[in-house]
Image (tube, rainbow, N blue to C red):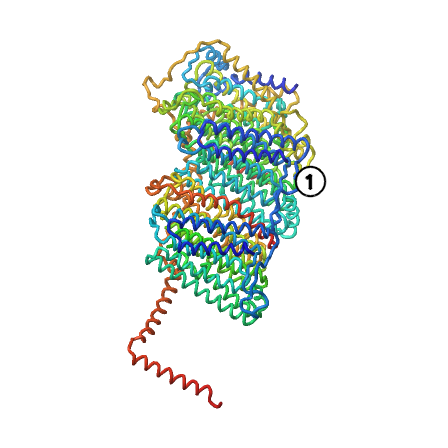
């Protein structure tokens, strides 16, 4: 545990140092990188400790909140360790990438220390969220993370669209957090403590005592977590906020923050909630929400023409895959543990892969922006000649996200398809969800073909001359390479991560829930996955197939070269006409037009491309003089008339002060008479 | 290891037989046209000629040069997952889903070759190829999933074993019909050869391909024809079944010839669909297939 | 003992000196007296270290034979410490801030006239508020209470133009009318129990108790600008920012809720019905203030309405306590401290805007952060503290309030929860919107022209920013000492 605290302290110290450093634009980034890599080493040490010698548990709370059963208590179990590893690695890559990226002219006006300080604070908050074992502080760190990410979204704060995006993001997630808080409070009132163990037992008790209330609580939790995860319809903030943040920040959102929504869901629905009827209801809900996100998010990505916005919609879609898998897992927890574990494992595996390829793609988008200064993919083209390495990385990440074997995305998607289809043998609705996922996988492919084709290939756009020659600096290359390398590694050796995930998941359930990893994923080699559910086997062994593929490629290459033909380089033939680059370009907008025309919303005259509803928030214009204002303006109809009436009344009396002595004499006389009469009247008979 | 070697044998077999199948196809088409047609071994000659031709390089990108190699490699790899006279050689390495995605990999390579060339026609072709992928692939998937659901397994051998003895059912009929139409599209035959569409966009993604590259692409398409024919036959027409490998291989070739005759008839009597018509057609087909899926789920 | 006397004496002496000292020495006098005050507070805390304490430091029976206990004295317990911290620390900062603010360089009110008046009344007011905080019984509380009303009248009318004179008179009239109810309540209480102590209320018959408590409530509503007596507070924004911040956000308006908090903590058996009335009126006030947020074009008035809403939070918590959930009282009391710091910071930020850019109009301001980054940081911190984003101060009390509402449960709890939550969320949205509008974006003409700000003002902002982070932990400890 001290190692973990040291890591947090390093992040915080790094933030302070960067704040203090001022405007040393070159060195400040290295300080941030140094801090995060140091912290990462420590965190990875923690993670290794967890996986070798069991969870790290803190005995005594750092702080007990008075009047509330909440205590600042950390606990790193296997699941936390898994997420910690992901986050820490992302933090190193992000800060490394930011070195050069943040030097571009676009951010020249902004203060870098603000960026790095907030970024490091953000990572501190994120790792605290994962490692905490008390719901109250979980929410506090959660909201601190939201705050930091909001500050990153509005980093270029003189830009109105970014401000709007930041507003939307902060508002939506804040509302979601309010729901989380209420859910947590209701649970707390049943358990008397916010600690995870107490909540676990409270849920067991509530499941039988007050199932309705438990449904409400779970609904609130799901709402909160799904909002953060960018699941539609709650994740509407995402496509606005991601493009608004600088590329390193977008990567850290995609790589760590949105994934914590999944972490929350797993914690609450797998760890706290005992397997039972509640898990079935909410498992199905989660899976359906995931399916909606997959469909809407990815279909919308197909029509996007802004590089980062396109990627953002894919974030929604990919989160949908993870939700689908996790929902399926939760649904089958009480029915078929093996299938449930496979589905949950598939979800987390997809999450890890998603971190790799999505972060990589955001890095690529950042590199493109670094080179050409625009994100509009209609205006870019042929960048593969000046960014050959980045283009290669982009293709790997694209094949991975599209789920093409043997890259990592396929391995996890394969598990998801298998889990949903096998689930479908028991509960038919999952077949539909699984098929939806398969169908949308092709849409993902299509969308990235468009991205790759219009950014890296084809004719040069005319603004190519603006780009500096040479690929991006190595500090931006390395993160891309690392992530692309992970895409290949996890694709060829899917057993490797799956084994760790299995070890992280099983402790959440009672002992003996499922057997060991080999009983679920088969006895095969390091590379392979073999599932045996309901006596039906299925396998995916990447390595042998890859060997076959390599052999086939060698054969094909032999055929290709067999005749030793000559090569001739020449211009493309356009019917003999000289043609300008711009004329020969096939723009991103033109891809799949017939297909896009089919999938569009058309209600009467109202028509919009794509299936994504954009909510226009109404501008509030309240006039000062409407009825309600007059009604609540107490001054107007009550106090002012009252005071005026009093004044009139008093003025009437002041008229008696006329200044004439005989009038005063008259008053005195009347007064004396009245006094005498009253005296007689009251003392009569005495 | 035995599976591996058998897989290599199947790859060689497929590679060698595929042009023959196309030759038969051409002959059949010519028959329907009342022409004499080229000899059955014509595709081999075509390939040989192309392999020896000069290679034109009109685009600087790596994928432009090597996507043909990768495409052929991908489709050959998928051959080890396909039943061809016996159970798929490397079934434990991949099931139906892996097979579908390996085929997709080949399609992706075609698309990449399209988008890495300089000509706008190849972009249009690539775009069309992707649209086909978007609409045809789901049909294939749903058809195969219907069979998988009936058999409660996603492995070819289980599916075949189940359907060889299963009674007739409506959902299987719908799945078979859908897969047949999808296979025509995968074989790039009329009315669904919209991607290449010689007369419209001049071979689409292949317009700038020449020499050995074009040869490999053509070979890839032949192999794809054979593989899809094999899958269709294995899943929907598994009878008659023989224990003897050679016998069943011959049977399969005969069945393939019959299937190709059907394809040829469709090819000859239909004009090409426009891309939007084709997309619509397959989307409607997809809805139909999902109806079939519903039947399968309720058990009929 | 001596420390308490000094605590009151320093501001009083400062007030008197401000009137007689030469104008050049005004700053010195003011700063000296508040520094002395701050030091004596620290001394007091060293003498009586924080813990579970309830010390009657001094007691004097100034009307012989009237009551068993002393009538005049100093009571130091966590609740009074809470208010004392607000009064003294913020008083110190506001005087410091005022030395920079009331100057010729101020763009909005470029005049140094009346600095001595300002300091005199403000220091006197600080003394009066210390008296309120330390009062051991209702009579002394009433005494200082009326003194604060008087100071408020003088301070609101500081600029002596028609608007501020009218606003001052209005404030005086309304708070004083409320004070009449206080007096009436006191008389009845004394007639029936012979005591002025806070817990004397529980000796009354239930029906009478309800009515007497209602009288006190009316006084508190008027003082704390609650519905239907809220109208004086927005008008009082005609005062200098120092006054608005100190009287109408941090200290004076807190006297009203402090009275109710005192009574609630002393008598947890206040009728359920009065609790319901308090809570419902609090919710009504919140909704009203929220509704009025949207039409404000003046930042200060917006903050004034927000103050109204936040005082309603305090009363909401106290109402929950009266309805049976004690946690509410602690939450409400904590909110006194948390809100004072946050709102004080925001007011001072607006003061900086008036000083530096010469306007407080939302429409005329945008992109201020470009020119005055420290101001943007301070404002955003204050805003987040106000809106309840952890780890800033407002979060803690809001969370406790939510917890109390849910703990109360039942129909009343859930029905109260919904408007409360709505207020929190919509208020959040609006303030975020305003913060974006004013501090980010492309600088407007006035924002681009902003002038630098003296150190004393920046210092006050800096201290308050730190306080927004620190203060909840003090509040939590104090409430813990109260028995939470």
* Occupied quadrant, residue A107: top left
Question: In front: C56, or C411?
Answer: C56
Q: Quadrant of the N terminus of chain A?
A: top right
Say if residue C248 shows up in the picture: no
Q: Position of residue A473 (x, y in %)?
A: 46, 23
A677 is higher (above) or lower (below) than B112: below
> For residue A418, what is the image quadrant?
top right
A380 on left or right of C206 = left
Residue C1: where, in percent of width, then height? Answer: 56, 56
Nearest the camera: B253 or C466?
C466
* Residue A566 appears in the picture as rendered: yes
* Relative image position of residue C237 (x, y in whole percent): 39, 54
Indicate whether C412 appears above or below A295. Answer: below
Quarter assignment of residue B12: top right
Farthest residue, direction left: A660
Q: Depth check: C220 or A423 in front? A: C220
Q: Is residue C401 left or right of residue C26?
A: right
Q: Residues within 10 Å of mark 1 (few under 14, many from 20)?
A: few
Q: Nearer the viewer, residue A103 or C474?
A: C474
Locate residue A328, reporting x and y percent.
59, 39
Left or right, A375 with reference to C336: left
How many circles with numbers are drawn on the protein? 1
- SS at badge 1: loop
For disc 1, the marked residue is A510
Determine the residue located farthest toward the right in the rendered image: A512
Q: Identify whether A163 is placed above or below C140.
A: above
């Amino acid at each position: 545990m001290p190692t973990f605290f040291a890591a947090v302290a390093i992040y915080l110290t790094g933030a302070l140092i960067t704040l203090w450093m001022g405007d040393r634009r070159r060195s400040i980034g290295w300080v941030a990188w140094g801090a995060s890599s140091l912290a990462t080493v420590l965190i990875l040490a923690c993670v290794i400790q967890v996986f070798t010698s069991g969870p790290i548990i803190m005995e005594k709370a750092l702080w007990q909140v008075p009047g509330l059963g909440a205590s600042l208590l950390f606990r790193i179990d296997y699941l936390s360790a898994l997420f910690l590893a992901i986050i820490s690695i992302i933090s190193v890559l992000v800060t490394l990438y930011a070195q050069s990226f943040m030097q571009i002219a676009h951010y020249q006006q902004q203060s870098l220390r603000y960026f790095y300080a907030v970024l490091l604070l953000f990572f501190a908050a994120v790792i605290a969220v994962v490692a905490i074992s008390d719901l109250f502080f979980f929410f506090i760190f959660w909201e601190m993370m939201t705050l930091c990410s909001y500050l990153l979204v509005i980093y270029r704060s003189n830009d109105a669209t970014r401000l709007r995006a930041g507003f939307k993001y902060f508002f939506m997630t804040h509302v979601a957090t309010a729901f989380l808080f209420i859910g947590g409070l209701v649970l707390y009132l049943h358990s008397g403590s916010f600690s995870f163990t107490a909540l676990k037992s409270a849920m067991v008790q509530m499941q039988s005592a007050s199932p309705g209330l438990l449904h409400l609580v779970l609904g609130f939790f799901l709402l909160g977590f799904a909002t953060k995860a960018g699941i539609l319809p709650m994740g509407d903030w995402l496509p606005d906020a991601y493009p608004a943040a600088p590329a390193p920040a977008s990567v850290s959102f995609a790589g760590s923050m949105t994934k914590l929504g999944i972490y929350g869901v797993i914690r609450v629905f797998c760890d706290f909630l005992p397997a039972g009827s509640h898990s079935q209801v909410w498992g199905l809900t989660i899976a359906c929400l995931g399916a909606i996100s997959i469909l809407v998010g990815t279909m919308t990505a197909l029509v996007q023409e802004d590089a980062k916005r396109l990627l953002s919609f894919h974030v929604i879609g990919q989160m949908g895959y993870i939700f689908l898998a996790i929902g399926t897992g939760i649904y089958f927890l009480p029915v078929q543990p093996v299938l449930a574990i496979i589905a949950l494992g598939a979800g987390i595996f997809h999450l890890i892969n998603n971190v790799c390829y999505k972060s990589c793609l955001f890095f690529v988008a950042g590199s493109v922006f670094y080179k050409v200064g625009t994100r509009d993919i209609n205006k870019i083209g042929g960048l593969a000649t000046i960014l050959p390495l980045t283009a290669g990385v982009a293709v790997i990440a694209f094949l991975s996200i599209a789920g093409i074997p043997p890259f990592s995305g396929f391995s996890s998607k394969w598990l998801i398809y298998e889990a949903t289809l096998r689930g479908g043998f028991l509960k038919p609705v999952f077949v539909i969800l699984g098929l939806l996922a398969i169908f949308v996988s092709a849409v993902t492919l299509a969308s990235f073909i468009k991205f790759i084709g219009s950014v890296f290939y084809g004719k040069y756009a005319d603004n190519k001359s603006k780009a500096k020659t040479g690929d991006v600096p190595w500090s931006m290359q390395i993160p891309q390479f690392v992530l692309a390398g992970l895409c290949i590694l996890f694709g060829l050796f899917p057993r490797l991560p799956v084994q760790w995930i299995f070890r992280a998941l099983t402790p959440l359930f009672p002992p003996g829930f499922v057997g060991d990893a080999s009983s679920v994923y088969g006895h095969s080699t390091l590379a392979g996955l073999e599932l045996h559910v309901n006596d039906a086997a299925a396998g995916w062994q990447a390595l042998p197939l890859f060997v076959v593929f390599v052999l086939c490629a060698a054969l094909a290459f032999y055929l290709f070269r067999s005749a030793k033909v000559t090569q001739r380089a020449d211009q493309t033939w356009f019917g003999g006409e000289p043609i300008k680059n711009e004329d020969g370009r096939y723009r991103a907008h033109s891809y799949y037009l017939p297909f896009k025309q089919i999938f569009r919303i058309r209600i009467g005259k109202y028509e919009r491309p794509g299936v994504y509803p954009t909510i226009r928030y109404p501008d509030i214009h309240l006039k000062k003089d409407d009825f309600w204002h007059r009604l609540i303006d107490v001054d107007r109809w009550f106090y002012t008339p009252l005071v005026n009436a009093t004044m009139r009344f008093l003025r009437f009396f002041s008229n008696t002060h006329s200044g004439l002595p005989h009038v005063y004499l008259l008053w005195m006389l009347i007064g004396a008479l009245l006094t005498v009469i009253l005296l007689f009247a009251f003392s009569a008979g005495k | 290891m035995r599976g591996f070697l058998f897989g290599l044998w199947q790859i060689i077999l497929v590679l060698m037989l595929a042009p023959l199948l196309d030759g038969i196809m051409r002959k059949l088409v010519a028959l329907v046209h009342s022409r004499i047609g080229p000899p059955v071994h014509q595709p081999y000659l075509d390939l040989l000629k192309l392999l020896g031709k000069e290679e034109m390089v009109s685009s600087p990108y790596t994928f432009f040069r090597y996507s043909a190699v990768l495409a052929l490699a991908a489709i050959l790899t998928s051959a080890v997952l396909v039943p061809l006279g016996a159970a798929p050689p490397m079934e434990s390495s991949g099931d139906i889903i892996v097979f579908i995605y390996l085929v997709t990999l080949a399609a992706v390579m075609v698309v990449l070759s399209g988008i890495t060339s300089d000509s706008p026609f190849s972009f249009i072709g690539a775009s069309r190829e992707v649209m086909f992928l978007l609409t045809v692939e789901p049909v294939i998937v749903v058809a195969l999933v219907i069979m998988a659901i009936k058999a409660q397994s996603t492995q070819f051998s289980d599916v075949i074993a189940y359907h060889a003895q299963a009674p007739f059912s409506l959902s299987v009929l719908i799945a078979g019909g859908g897969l047949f139409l999808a296979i025509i599209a995968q074989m790039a035959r009329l009315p669904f050869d919209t991607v290449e569409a010689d007369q419209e966009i001049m071979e689409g993604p292949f317009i700038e391909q020449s020499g050995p590259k074009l040869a490999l692409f053509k070979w890839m398409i032949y192999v794809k024809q054979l593989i899809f024919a094999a899958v269709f036959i294995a899943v929907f027409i598994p009878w008659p079944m023989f224990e003897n490998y050679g016998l069943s291989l011959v049977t399969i070739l005969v069945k393939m010839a019959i299937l190709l005759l059907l394809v040829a008839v469709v090819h000859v009597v239909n004009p090409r669909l426009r891309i939007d018509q084709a997309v619509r057609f397959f989307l409607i087909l997809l809805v139909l297939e999902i109806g079939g899926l519903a039947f399968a789920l309720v058990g009929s | 003992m001596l420390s308490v006397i000094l605590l009151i004496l320093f501001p009083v002496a400062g007030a008197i000196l401000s009137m007689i000292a030469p104008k050049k020495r005004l700053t010195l006098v003011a700063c000296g007296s508040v520094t002395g005050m701050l030091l004596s507070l620290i001394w007091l805390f060293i003498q009586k270290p924080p813990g579970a304490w309830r010390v009657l430091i001094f007691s004097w029976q100034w009307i012989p034979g009237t009551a068993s206990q002393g009538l005049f004295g100093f009571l130091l317990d966590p609740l009074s410490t809470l208010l004392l911290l607000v009064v003294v620390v913020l008083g110190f900062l506001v005087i410091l801030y005022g030395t920079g603010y009331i100057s010729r360089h101020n763009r909005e009110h470029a005049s140094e006239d009346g600095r001595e008046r300002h300091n005199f009344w403000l220091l006197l007011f600080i003394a009066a508020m210390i008296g309120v905080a330390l009062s051991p019984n209702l009579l002394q509380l009433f005494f200082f209470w009326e003194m604060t009303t008087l100071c408020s009248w003088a301070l609101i009318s500081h600029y002596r133009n028609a608007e501020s004179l009218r606003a001052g008179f209005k404030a005086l009239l309304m708070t004083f009318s409320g004070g009449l109810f206080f007096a009436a309540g006191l008389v009845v209480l004394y007639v029936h129990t012979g005591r002025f102590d806070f817990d004397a209320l529980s000796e009354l018959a239930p029906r009478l108790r309800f009515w007497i408590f209602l009288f006190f409530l009316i006084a508190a509503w008027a003082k704390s600008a609650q519905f239907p007596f809220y109208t004086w507070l927005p008008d009082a924004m005609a005062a200098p920012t120092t006054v608005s911040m100190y009287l109408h956000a941090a200290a004076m308006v807190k006297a009203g809720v402090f009275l109710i908090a005192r009574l609630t903590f002393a008598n947890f058996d206040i009728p359920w019905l009065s609790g319901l009335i308090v809570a419902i009126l609090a919710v009504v006030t919140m909704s009203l203030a929220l509704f009025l947020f949207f039409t404000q074009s003046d930042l200060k008035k917006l903050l004034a309405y927000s103050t109204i809403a936040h005082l309603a939070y305090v009363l909401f918590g106290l109402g929950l306590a009266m309805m049976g959930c004690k946690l509410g009282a602690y939450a409400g009391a904590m909110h006194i401290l948390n809100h004072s710091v946050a709102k004080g910071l925001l007011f001072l930020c607006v003061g900086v805007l008036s000083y530096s850019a010469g306007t407080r109009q939302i429409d005329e301001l945008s992109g201020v952060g470009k020119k005055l980054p420290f101001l943007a940081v301070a404002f955003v911190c204050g805003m987040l503290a106000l809106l309840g984003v952890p780890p800033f101060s407002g979060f803690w009390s809001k969370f406790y309030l939510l917890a109390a509402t849910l703990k109360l449960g039942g129909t009343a709890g859930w029905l109260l929860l919904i408007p409360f939550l709505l207020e929190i969320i919509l208020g959040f949205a609006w303030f975020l919107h305003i913060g974006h509008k004013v501090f980010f974006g492309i600088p407007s003409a006035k924002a681009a022209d902003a002038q630098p700000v003296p150190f004393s003002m920046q210092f006050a902002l800096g201290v308050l920013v730190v306080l927004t982070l620190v203060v909840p932990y003090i509040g939590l400890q104090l409430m813990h000492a109260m028995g939470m």
